[in-house]
Protein backbone atom coordinates (compact mmCIF):
# COMPACT_ATOMS: atom_id res chain seq x y z
CA UNK A 1 0.00 0.00 0.00
CA UNK A 2 1.19 3.51 -0.78
CA UNK A 3 1.28 6.57 1.43
CA UNK A 4 -1.96 8.56 1.59
CA UNK A 5 -0.77 11.96 2.72
CA UNK A 6 -2.98 14.61 4.25
CA UNK A 7 -2.96 18.04 2.67
CA UNK A 8 -2.20 21.06 4.84
CA UNK A 9 -5.85 21.79 5.58
CA UNK A 10 -6.59 18.21 6.67
CA UNK A 11 -3.37 18.08 8.69
CA UNK A 12 -4.22 21.22 10.66
CA UNK A 13 -7.75 19.97 11.24
CA UNK A 14 -6.41 16.66 12.52
CA UNK A 15 -4.21 18.28 15.18
CA UNK A 16 -6.66 20.97 16.22
CA UNK A 17 -8.97 21.07 19.21
CA UNK A 18 -8.80 18.05 21.49
CA UNK A 19 -7.90 15.59 18.74
CA UNK A 20 -5.16 13.04 19.35
CA UNK A 21 -2.90 12.53 16.35
CA UNK A 22 0.33 10.72 15.58
CA UNK A 23 1.87 12.36 12.52
CA UNK A 24 4.55 10.90 10.27
CA UNK A 25 6.43 13.75 8.59
CA UNK A 26 8.08 12.09 5.59
CA UNK A 27 10.02 12.76 2.44
CA UNK A 28 10.36 9.57 0.43
CA UNK A 29 13.10 11.08 -1.72
CA UNK A 30 15.35 11.92 1.20
CA UNK A 31 17.57 9.59 3.16
CA UNK A 32 20.37 10.26 5.61
CA UNK A 33 23.15 7.68 5.29
CA UNK A 34 25.13 6.35 8.21
CA UNK A 35 28.24 4.26 8.32
CA UNK A 36 28.88 1.02 10.09
CA UNK A 37 32.20 0.63 8.31
CA UNK A 38 35.09 -0.02 10.69
CA UNK A 39 37.18 -2.24 8.41
CA UNK A 40 38.91 -1.55 5.07
CA UNK A 41 36.95 -2.62 1.99
CA UNK A 42 37.46 -2.36 -1.74
CA UNK A 43 34.78 -1.66 -4.30
CA UNK A 44 33.26 -5.01 -3.36
CA UNK A 45 29.86 -5.41 -4.94
CA UNK A 46 29.43 -1.70 -5.57
CA UNK A 47 27.88 -2.29 -8.99
CA UNK A 48 25.32 -4.74 -7.61
CA UNK A 49 24.56 -3.24 -4.24
CA UNK A 50 21.05 -3.81 -2.97
CA UNK A 51 18.91 -0.71 -3.62
CA UNK A 52 18.70 1.29 -0.44
CA UNK A 53 15.42 2.58 0.90
CA UNK A 54 15.17 5.79 2.83
CA UNK A 55 13.75 5.80 6.33
CA UNK A 56 10.46 7.17 4.98
CA UNK A 57 10.20 4.37 2.45
CA UNK A 58 11.02 1.76 5.09
CA UNK A 59 8.29 3.12 7.37
CA UNK A 60 5.66 3.12 4.63
CA UNK A 61 4.51 -0.51 4.77
CA UNK A 62 4.48 -0.58 8.58
CA UNK A 63 2.48 2.65 8.76
CA UNK A 64 -0.02 1.78 6.05
CA UNK A 65 -0.71 -1.67 7.50
CA UNK A 66 -2.46 -0.03 10.49
CA UNK A 67 -3.43 3.41 9.15
CA UNK A 68 -6.83 2.18 7.94
CA UNK A 69 -7.89 1.10 11.42
CA UNK A 70 -6.47 4.08 13.32
CA UNK A 71 -7.93 7.45 12.33
CA UNK A 72 -5.40 9.20 14.58
CA UNK A 73 -2.56 8.27 12.19
CA UNK A 74 -1.70 11.05 9.75
CA UNK A 75 1.15 11.34 7.27
CA UNK A 76 2.39 14.59 5.76
CA UNK A 77 4.73 14.94 2.77
CA UNK A 78 7.41 17.50 3.56
CA UNK A 79 8.67 17.53 -0.03
CA UNK A 80 5.48 19.36 -1.04
CA UNK A 81 4.79 21.13 2.25
CA UNK A 82 8.19 22.21 3.48
CA UNK A 83 6.87 25.40 5.13
CA UNK A 84 4.61 23.34 7.41
CA UNK A 85 7.46 20.99 8.35
CA UNK A 86 9.73 23.95 9.06
CA UNK A 87 7.01 25.42 11.28
CA UNK A 88 7.02 22.28 13.42
CA UNK A 89 10.81 21.99 13.55
CA UNK A 90 11.17 18.88 11.37
CA UNK A 91 14.78 18.54 10.27
CA UNK A 92 15.08 14.84 9.39
CA UNK A 93 12.80 12.17 7.98
CA UNK A 94 10.79 10.33 8.90
CA UNK A 95 9.88 12.24 12.07
CA UNK A 96 6.99 10.98 14.19
CA UNK A 97 5.26 13.53 16.39
CA UNK A 98 2.34 13.02 18.75
CA UNK A 99 -0.19 15.81 19.28
CA UNK A 100 -1.90 15.28 22.63
CA UNK A 101 -5.09 17.31 22.13
CA UNK A 102 -3.93 19.95 24.60
CA UNK A 103 -1.63 21.91 22.32
CA UNK A 104 1.47 19.87 23.10
CA UNK A 105 3.63 18.06 20.54
CA UNK A 106 5.99 15.27 21.61
CA UNK A 107 8.43 13.11 19.69
CA UNK A 108 7.57 9.44 19.30
CA UNK A 109 10.86 7.59 19.83
CA UNK A 110 9.56 4.06 19.96
CA UNK A 111 10.18 1.32 17.38
CA UNK A 112 8.96 1.97 13.85
CA UNK A 113 7.07 -1.34 13.84
CA UNK A 114 3.33 -1.47 13.21
CA UNK A 115 2.76 -3.41 16.44
CA UNK A 116 4.74 -0.89 18.51
CA UNK A 117 2.94 2.07 16.93
CA UNK A 118 -0.45 0.44 17.59
CA UNK A 119 0.56 -0.19 21.22
CA UNK A 120 1.52 3.45 21.58
CA UNK A 121 -1.87 4.61 20.32
CA UNK A 122 -3.60 2.51 22.99
CA UNK A 123 -1.23 3.92 25.59
CA UNK A 124 -1.83 7.49 24.45
CA UNK A 125 -5.50 7.45 25.47
CA UNK A 126 -4.61 6.42 29.02
CA UNK A 127 -3.22 8.78 31.66
CA UNK A 128 0.57 8.94 31.82
CA UNK A 129 0.20 7.11 35.16
CA UNK A 130 -2.65 4.70 35.83
CA UNK A 131 -3.78 4.53 39.45
CA UNK A 132 -3.92 0.91 40.57
CA UNK A 133 -4.60 -1.24 43.60
CA UNK A 134 -3.28 -4.68 44.49
CA UNK A 135 -6.32 -6.32 42.92
CA UNK A 136 -6.01 -4.93 39.40
CA UNK A 137 -2.23 -4.55 39.26
CA UNK A 138 -1.72 -8.13 38.06
CA UNK A 139 -3.71 -7.52 34.89
CA UNK A 140 -1.91 -4.22 34.31
CA UNK A 141 1.45 -6.00 34.32
CA UNK A 142 0.68 -7.44 30.89
CA UNK A 143 -1.10 -4.46 29.33
CA UNK A 144 1.97 -3.49 27.28
CA UNK A 145 5.36 -4.78 26.11
CA UNK A 146 7.00 -2.70 28.85
CA UNK A 147 5.26 -1.89 32.12
CA UNK A 148 6.52 -0.18 35.27
CA UNK A 149 4.49 -0.33 38.47
CA UNK A 150 5.49 1.83 41.41
CA UNK A 151 4.53 1.09 45.00
CA UNK A 152 5.14 4.49 46.58
CA UNK A 153 4.74 5.60 50.16
CA UNK A 154 3.13 9.04 50.25
CA UNK A 155 5.89 10.32 52.53
CA UNK A 156 8.40 9.85 49.69
CA UNK A 157 7.32 12.95 47.82
CA UNK A 158 10.57 13.10 45.84
CA UNK A 159 9.88 9.60 44.46
CA UNK A 160 6.37 10.62 43.41
CA UNK A 161 7.77 13.66 41.61
CA UNK A 162 10.51 11.61 39.91
CA UNK A 163 8.02 8.94 38.82
CA UNK A 164 5.74 11.58 37.30
CA UNK A 165 8.71 13.00 35.41
CA UNK A 166 9.90 9.70 33.91
CA UNK A 167 6.35 8.62 33.04
CA UNK A 168 5.91 11.78 30.99
CA UNK A 169 9.33 11.35 29.39
CA UNK A 170 8.91 7.70 28.44
CA UNK A 171 5.17 7.40 27.83
CA UNK A 172 5.85 6.82 24.13
CA UNK A 173 7.59 3.54 25.00
CA UNK A 174 6.14 2.17 28.25
CA UNK A 175 3.07 2.05 30.49
CA UNK A 176 3.20 3.28 34.08
CA UNK A 177 1.06 2.33 37.07
CA UNK A 178 1.02 3.59 40.65
CA UNK A 179 -0.07 1.90 43.89
CA UNK A 180 -0.14 3.65 47.25
CA UNK A 181 1.68 1.72 49.97
CA UNK A 182 2.43 2.16 53.66
CA UNK A 183 5.65 0.21 53.29
CA UNK A 184 8.90 0.98 51.54
CA UNK A 185 8.71 2.53 48.07
CA UNK A 186 9.68 0.15 45.26
CA UNK A 187 9.33 0.11 41.49
CA UNK A 188 8.94 -3.07 39.44
CA UNK A 189 9.82 -3.40 35.76
CA UNK A 190 8.04 -5.90 33.50
CA UNK A 191 9.70 -6.35 30.12
CA UNK A 192 7.10 -8.71 28.71
CA UNK A 193 8.65 -8.94 25.26
CA UNK A 194 11.82 -10.48 26.68
CA UNK A 195 10.15 -12.09 29.73
CA UNK A 196 12.32 -10.19 32.18
CA UNK A 197 11.32 -8.68 35.53
CA UNK A 198 13.30 -6.82 38.17
CA UNK A 199 12.54 -4.54 41.11
CA UNK A 200 14.38 -1.48 42.44
CA UNK A 201 14.10 -0.28 46.03
CA UNK A 202 17.11 2.04 46.21
CA UNK A 203 15.62 5.21 44.73
CA UNK A 204 17.90 7.74 46.38
CA UNK A 205 20.16 8.52 43.41
CA UNK A 206 19.04 11.46 41.28
CA UNK A 207 19.00 9.41 38.05
CA UNK A 208 17.97 6.07 39.57
CA UNK A 209 14.50 6.08 38.05
CA UNK A 210 15.68 7.19 34.63
CA UNK A 211 18.25 4.41 34.51
CA UNK A 212 15.64 1.90 35.66
CA UNK A 213 13.23 2.87 32.90
CA UNK A 214 15.97 2.88 30.25
CA UNK A 215 17.03 -0.61 31.33
CA UNK A 216 13.44 -1.79 31.36
CA UNK A 217 12.54 -0.59 27.86
CA UNK A 218 15.84 -1.69 26.28
CA UNK A 219 15.08 -4.76 24.14
CA UNK A 220 17.29 -7.78 24.52
CA UNK A 221 17.58 -7.81 20.74
CA UNK A 222 17.42 -4.26 19.46
CA UNK A 223 17.17 -2.65 16.06
CA UNK A 224 20.31 -1.03 14.68
CA UNK A 225 19.60 2.46 13.31
CA UNK A 226 21.48 5.64 12.67
CA UNK A 227 20.05 7.02 15.92
CA UNK A 228 21.67 4.35 18.09
CA UNK A 229 24.70 3.41 15.98
CA UNK A 230 27.28 4.97 18.29
CA UNK A 231 25.63 3.57 21.41
CA UNK A 232 26.12 0.06 20.11
CA UNK A 233 29.58 0.64 18.66
CA UNK A 234 30.83 2.18 21.91
CA UNK A 235 29.17 -0.32 24.26
CA UNK A 236 32.32 -2.42 24.61
CA UNK A 237 30.46 -5.46 23.29
CA UNK A 238 30.69 -7.25 19.98
CA UNK A 239 27.64 -7.04 17.74
CA UNK A 240 25.70 -9.86 16.14
CA UNK A 241 23.92 -8.18 13.21
CA UNK A 242 21.03 -9.89 11.42
CA UNK A 243 19.93 -8.37 8.10
CA UNK A 244 16.47 -8.99 6.65
CA UNK A 245 14.16 -7.11 4.31
CA UNK A 246 10.87 -7.82 6.10
CA UNK A 247 9.89 -6.84 9.63
CA UNK A 248 8.40 -10.32 10.01
CA UNK A 249 11.78 -11.94 9.42
CA UNK A 250 13.47 -9.58 11.86
CA UNK A 251 10.87 -10.16 14.57
CA UNK A 252 11.03 -13.93 14.03
CA UNK A 253 14.82 -13.78 14.45
CA UNK A 254 14.43 -11.82 17.69
CA UNK A 255 11.91 -14.33 19.02
CA UNK A 256 13.99 -17.37 18.06
CA UNK A 257 17.31 -15.93 19.21
CA UNK A 258 16.17 -14.61 22.58
CA UNK A 259 17.63 -17.42 24.68
CA UNK A 260 20.99 -17.24 22.88
CA UNK A 261 21.04 -13.46 23.39
CA UNK A 262 20.34 -13.94 27.10
CA UNK A 263 23.18 -16.44 27.35
CA UNK A 264 25.73 -14.01 25.87
CA UNK A 265 24.25 -10.64 26.90
CA UNK A 266 27.30 -9.66 28.97
CA UNK A 267 29.55 -9.93 25.91
CA UNK A 268 27.36 -9.59 22.82
CA UNK A 269 24.65 -7.25 21.59
CA UNK A 270 22.25 -8.95 19.19
CA UNK A 271 20.63 -6.49 16.77
CA UNK A 272 18.46 -6.62 13.67
CA UNK A 273 19.08 -4.42 10.63
CA UNK A 274 16.45 -3.37 8.11
CA UNK A 275 18.07 -4.47 4.85
CA UNK A 276 15.70 -2.26 2.85
CA UNK A 277 17.05 0.86 4.50
CA UNK A 278 20.57 -0.21 5.47
CA UNK A 279 21.34 -3.00 3.03
CA UNK A 280 24.66 -1.43 2.08
CA UNK A 281 25.90 -2.07 5.64
CA UNK A 282 26.31 -5.70 4.66
CA UNK A 283 29.18 -4.97 2.28
CA UNK A 284 31.79 -3.79 4.82
CA UNK A 285 30.86 -6.80 6.95
CA UNK A 286 31.98 -9.20 4.22
CA UNK A 287 28.47 -10.24 3.23
CA UNK A 288 27.17 -10.65 -0.31
CA UNK A 289 25.48 -7.44 -1.47
CA UNK A 290 21.72 -7.74 -1.81
CA UNK A 291 21.50 -11.31 -0.48
CA UNK A 292 19.32 -11.45 2.62
CA UNK A 293 18.72 -12.66 5.28
CA UNK A 294 22.36 -12.52 6.33
CA UNK A 295 24.35 -12.36 9.55
CA UNK A 296 27.74 -11.12 10.71
CA UNK A 297 29.58 -10.56 13.96
CA UNK A 298 31.51 -7.32 14.44
CA UNK A 299 34.05 -6.49 17.13
CA UNK A 300 34.29 -2.67 17.03
CA UNK A 301 37.08 -2.58 19.61
CA UNK A 302 39.51 -4.50 17.38
CA UNK A 303 37.99 -3.58 14.01
CA UNK A 304 37.21 -7.21 13.21
CA UNK A 305 34.22 -8.65 11.36
CA UNK A 306 33.16 -12.26 10.95
CA UNK A 307 30.62 -12.83 8.16
CA UNK A 308 28.42 -15.89 8.60
CA UNK A 309 29.23 -17.74 5.40
CA UNK A 310 27.85 -21.19 6.15
CA UNK A 311 25.07 -22.36 3.88
CA UNK A 312 23.27 -23.71 6.95
CA UNK A 313 20.09 -21.88 7.94
CA UNK A 314 20.48 -19.07 10.46
CA UNK A 315 19.07 -20.54 13.68
CA UNK A 316 19.78 -20.43 17.43
CA UNK A 317 21.89 -23.58 17.08
CA UNK A 318 23.98 -22.41 14.12
CA UNK A 319 24.46 -18.90 15.50
CA UNK A 320 25.43 -20.25 18.92
CA UNK A 321 27.95 -22.57 17.28
CA UNK A 322 29.28 -19.72 15.10
CA UNK A 323 29.83 -17.51 18.15
CA UNK A 324 31.69 -20.33 19.94
CA UNK A 325 33.88 -20.89 16.87
CA UNK A 326 34.82 -17.20 16.94
CA UNK A 327 35.60 -17.32 20.66
CA UNK A 328 37.75 -20.42 20.16
CA UNK A 329 39.48 -18.76 17.18
CA UNK A 330 38.30 -21.45 14.78
CA UNK A 331 37.05 -18.69 12.49
CA UNK A 332 39.39 -15.99 11.26
CA UNK A 333 38.20 -12.38 10.87
CA UNK A 334 37.47 -11.24 7.34
CA UNK A 335 40.51 -9.68 5.68
CA UNK A 336 38.48 -6.84 4.20
CA UNK A 337 39.55 -7.74 0.68
CA UNK A 338 38.17 -11.15 -0.27
CA UNK A 339 34.96 -11.12 -2.24
CA UNK A 340 32.02 -12.68 -0.39
CA UNK A 341 31.80 -15.66 -2.75
CA UNK A 342 35.48 -16.37 -2.07
CA UNK A 343 34.82 -16.33 1.67
CA UNK A 344 32.01 -18.85 1.21
CA UNK A 345 34.22 -21.08 -0.91
CA UNK A 346 37.04 -20.97 1.65
CA UNK A 347 34.59 -21.82 4.43
CA UNK A 348 33.17 -24.78 2.49
CA UNK A 349 36.68 -26.13 1.92
CA UNK A 350 37.45 -26.26 5.65
Image (cartoon, rainbow, N blue to C red):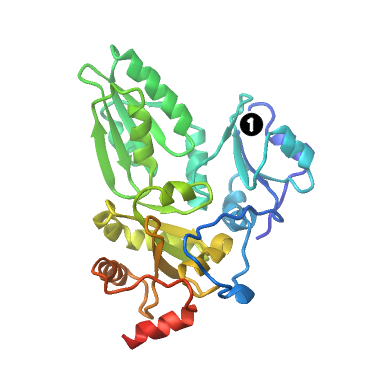
Q: Secondary structure at mark 1?
A: loop
Q: Residue at x 63, y 68 (%)?
A: 51
Find disc 1 in the rendering and name its residue. Answer: 19
Q: Residue at x 79, y 47 (%)?
A: 80
The residue closer to the viewer here, 331 or 15, is 331
Report x, y in % for residue 35.
54, 57
The relative height of residue 312 versus residue 17 in the rendered view (above or below) is below
Total labels: the figure holds 1
Name the outermost residue toward the left. 183
Q: Residue at x 76, y 37 (%)?
A: 84
Residue 59 as seen in the image, left or right of residue 188: right
Name the outermost residue toward the bottom. 349
Residue 35 as seen in the image, left or right of residue 197: right
The residue closer to the viewer here, 225 or 160, is 225
Label 1: few (<14), some or many (≥20) within 10 Å? some
Q: Is residue 143 visible?
A: no
Amino acid sequence: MAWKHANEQDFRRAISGHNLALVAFVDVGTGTPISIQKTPIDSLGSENSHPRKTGSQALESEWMSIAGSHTSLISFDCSTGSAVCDEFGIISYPALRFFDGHGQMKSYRGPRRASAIASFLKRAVRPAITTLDEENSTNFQSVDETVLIAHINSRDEHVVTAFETVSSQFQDRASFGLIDTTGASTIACYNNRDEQKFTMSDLTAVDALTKLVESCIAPLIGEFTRANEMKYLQSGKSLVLFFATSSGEREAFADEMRQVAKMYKEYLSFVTVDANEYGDFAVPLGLTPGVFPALAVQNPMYGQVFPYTSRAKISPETVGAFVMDIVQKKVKPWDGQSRPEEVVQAHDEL
